[in-house]
Amino acid sequence: MSNKRSQPSRLPPWGVGIQSTLGVAAVTAAGVTFDVSPLLGAGAAVVGGLCSVLANAGSWGPPAAVGIQLGRWSALGGWFTWAWSDFGWDWSTPADQTEWLSLAALGAGCMVGAHAGPWLKRLKQQPSQERGLVLMSASRECQEWQDRIITRGGAPFRGTVVAEVTSWPNDNGKDVRVVLPVGGATADNLRTHLAGLANDCNLPHGCTIELIEPVGEGQRTVTLRVPTVNQIAENIPHPLFDEQRSVMEGIPFGVHPNGDTAQAPIREESWLVVGKRGSGKTTLLHGMTATLGICSDAVVWHIDLNGGGMTQPWVEPWLQGRVDRPPVDWAAPTVDEAILMLQAAVRIAKHRKTAYRSRKKAHNTNLLPVGDDLPEVVIMLDEGAEALEEAGKGKVGQLADLLAEIQRIARNEAVNLVLSALRATGDIVPAGMVAQTGVGVCMKVKEQKEIARVFEDAWELKLKPEHLTAKGAGWLGVDGGHPARTQAWNILPDDMEQVGMRISRARPELDEASARIAGDAYTTRYERMRQLFADDGDNAHPAVLDEVDSTSTHSVTATGGGAAASWADPADIMSTAPASDGPASLTATTAPNEPTTRVPQVLAWATRLAEDTGQPRVSTTWLIDELGLDLTPRRFGMLLAAWGAPVGKQRINGTDIRGPATRDLKAALARIESGGPVDVTPTDAE
């Protein structure tokens, strides 16, 4: 015997119509018999309609469904009111034509209402189905991401929940909100799988996933920023801000893939911008000059040892007499001028430590307050390999020391640095300066290890040069945080002229106390700038820079405004004598009081790298790789041997190291610096 309860059969719509007609007719007849008041019919209609509205309140049904219910109750109430009135049915006389027509109308109305029932049910369900489709679509996308993460990460990610997937306002990507499992993977674990997830999503080339840790959320909740359009490859113009800004707000310089503005602090943090030639570094510095220039509490100084090309478009209207002062307060296209500038900056920083103590007390702050009466000095150095080269000698070395001192002592006193270099390797940017840099921007470079010099977690995050597919693209890291993709704004010469003239009229002057302590070098800077940046200026001619180190008496020839350590051509690096009309001899001779030996830059760099390792011997191939030389190990070994640092073999920590001994490199460098012979010619080097 079946335990199933039989389901009651439902009448078809026409059956419901007949049933409704008979029921309404019976109620009408009863009302006529007992002489019921017509107002009772109207009242019943009102109560029934109100109940229908309340029953549908808060449901997903559309207004049309409620309207149909009200129509049915209104028709029923109208029928009862008419039938029970003096003009309605009358049992005392035979039925007339009107009464027969009313019965026909009653039947037709009930039949229409009965057939409207199924349609009304479908109408009420339809919105819920549409909403269900939306929810199912969102749920499906969340489930896809959840499965993708667990599949890629394995067991530690089981229990991961993707709570939400939202599109960016610009429709160029999505944010995926992920809640990691208890006792499972961490945000750092998920970061290592971002490249794989991008591959699983088949994102366009140049689109990389970033992990953001939202402020105010727990450590298990993270957001994956997933670009679906490579907006980074687009040329985005600089907005050329109209209103004045403040360095306290940070400096915007581009956009992130989701359209958010890319910006970083500059009041207390020094910047390091790294990228090969053509990556967009100078354009980025131009954009920063434009933004800093309109700040009411900052003045900009430029150092460009490649002839002042970064400064030229900014000072051109001033040189032409169209404005009274340049938008760049001080510019140095030569090493000599740069030394004057940095010496003045050091004096300013030291003076501000004591001169403005009352100002800090009045503002109840430990950080020196800046303003239009006390602006921050921002010194920008474009492609300053010559100034940053750690083993630099003479004036170039002095310049590097001054930069390091400013970075070390001047943060609180509002004298800050924006350094730009071709590479971030130790021979170009000292490790100490990289460590003291609060904001890092890495644009297109040659090798992944150069990215790792700027961002320690570059290997872990699998940041690769090929991810940057356009000029101006890069990564931004702030105060040790994880790097984020950026695209720097593009600024054109006409834009620079337009905003430069506005800056010239509006920018603040250096405060009187700082200008006074900076001395005559600052007071007379405009005269030298006119000479250096004029069309007939002599800053492009070679200049011999004498050494200031008392332990070294050789000289260094600098061309192009002080490019003394340029090593674009390895052949130039290996040269140890100035070019002459005849063949260059690399044999140094000594004479009393007139030493003429130049230190081979490769030897100086190799010695410093070897000392930094702390090992007794370094590999020849490692030196070639770190120095970026286009030499075979055999050829470089012959060159080292000729300088007095022969290649040998030594077992260190269980590994055979073949290369020069550190002590031999140091001895060779010291011997040549003291005027000893360099027993090598170009033929020997070959």
Image (cartoon, rainbow, N blue to C red):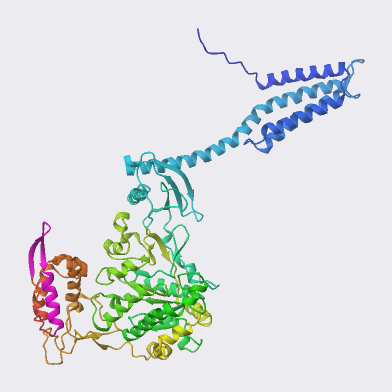
Q: Is residue 649 magenta?
A: yes
Q: Residue at x 33, y 44 (%)?
A: 152
Task: Judge by depth and name the residue closer to the eye, 185 or 137.
Answer: 185
237 vs 398, nearest the viewer: 398
Pick the front one: 420 or 142: 420
Q: Which residues are magenta?
A: 647-674
- Residue 536 in magenta? no
Residue 621 lies in quadrant:
bottom left
Relative depth, front residue between 638 and 649: 649
Q: Position of residue 494 (x, y in %)?
A: 48, 77
Residue 115 visible in the picture: yes
Give how far across and how far down residue 209 sits, in percent.
38, 53
**Which percent across, then down, holds residue 2?**
50, 9
**Residue at (26%, 80%) from the top-left corner?**
397
Horizontal relation, residue 192 to residue 514: left or right:
left
Say if residue 563 shows up in the picture.
no
Which residue sits furthest top? 1
Across the whole image, how many numbered discs are drawn on residues? 0
Image: 70 above or below 257 = above
Position of residue 459 in the picture relative to residue 235 (left or right): left
The picture quadrant where one finds residue 384 is bottom left
15 w.r.t. 451: above or below: above
Quarter of the figure that contains the C terminus: bottom left
